[in-house]
Image (cartoon, rainbow, N blue to C red):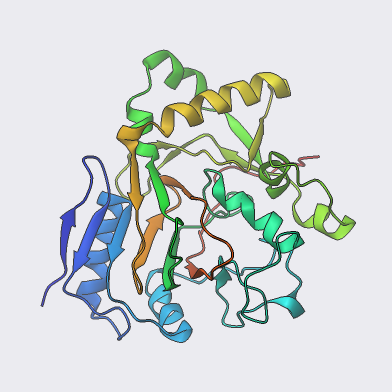
Amino acid sequence: MPVVIRSLHPVFVGEVSGVDLTKPLAREDVVAIEAGMDRYAVLVFHDQAFTDEQQMAFCRNFGEPENTRGGSVTKPEDARLKSGMADVSNLGKDGQPLARDSRQRLFNLGNCLWHSDSSFRVIPAKYSMLSARTVNPKGGNTEFADMRAAYDALDDDTRREIEDMVCEHSLMYSRGALGFLDYSEEEKAMFRPVLQRLVRTHPVTGRKSLYLSSHAGGIVGLPMPEARVLLRDLNEHATQPQFVYVHKWALHDLVIWDNRQTMHRVRRYDESQPRDMRRATVAGDVPTVAQQAAE
């Protein structure tokens, strides 16, 4: 049965049927999914009962998996998952919901802010693939925003103004917005700001998009207050309802999104109950800008 994609939103997001992602894929199915990503930027698959190994095998169809190191304050010995995937659940190593004052939980609350995965890395991520293993009974929807449509809707003056701008991205910016300011010297070095273009061009379609994220905390050459006003204005523009899709999770859903063309955020949920979500990430292959020292 061929891959079939049905549109779920006026400007992006497709729902895919006709493929079992837990099994090795035919080359034509991989090509169809990647073409769907180029068009829709977000793809939704239902009833994909992955093991961690199967999810990682699926991820490798689209590139090398990203190393998760450097994306959290969780020490390796405290990690719940050993499979190479990112743990975006509310669970500790013991499988129980994290305590309210847990440093790991407080840091992870940054996922409630609009962001693009791994924009804080010199080479940012290509695709993210999130699997719902345990769905929380209350809340926990994920919202996605189409940065291509948002760019297209900008006025000409703003496009010209931002075309060549370069931003500084760091996990310390996104978490600092929530008041999380306590870092070890090792963490400060690990989360050192990196440079990313504010406008990106898709390598296949040639379509331009805003490259925004809560990790963006400054713009090279602009005073910090001016930069943050502009970034806030752009974020407010890009997350208007007409650019946003809300995904309500069902057990064994898999959602894939292109971090080069979208932002996303999780909504609040009942953290006394488990929410087990596991993300495999396809690494990017090139930086968006030649790196300079970002102090």
Q: Residue furthest top?
A: 157
Residue at the location (39% across, 81% down)? Answer: 50
Choose between 276 and 279: the one closer to the eye: 276
Q: Quadrant of residue 159?
A: top left
Image coordinates for residue 226, horizontal then vertical, percent: 66, 18
In the rendered image, the vertical position of residue 149 relative to residue 183, given as above or below: above
**Viewer-nearest residue: 48 or 187:** 48
- Tell me the quarter of the image containing the N terminus: bottom left
Closest to the observer, 87 or 71: 87
Residue 141, image quadrant: bottom left
Which quarter of the rendered picture does the C terminus lie within?
top right
At a point 85% along the width and 60% down the height, the residue shown is 186
Judge whether 257 appears above or below 172 on screen. Answer: below
Residue 121 in view in this figure: no
Relative placement, left or right, of 244 versus 173 is: left
Residue under the image location 63 percent in, 53 percent down? 109
Q: Quadrant of residue 3?
A: bottom left
Q: Position of residue 142 (x, y in %)?
A: 42, 53
Residue 185 percent coordinates (x, y): 89, 56
Q: Is residue 133 left or right of residue 91?
A: left
Q: Which residue sits furthest right? A: 185
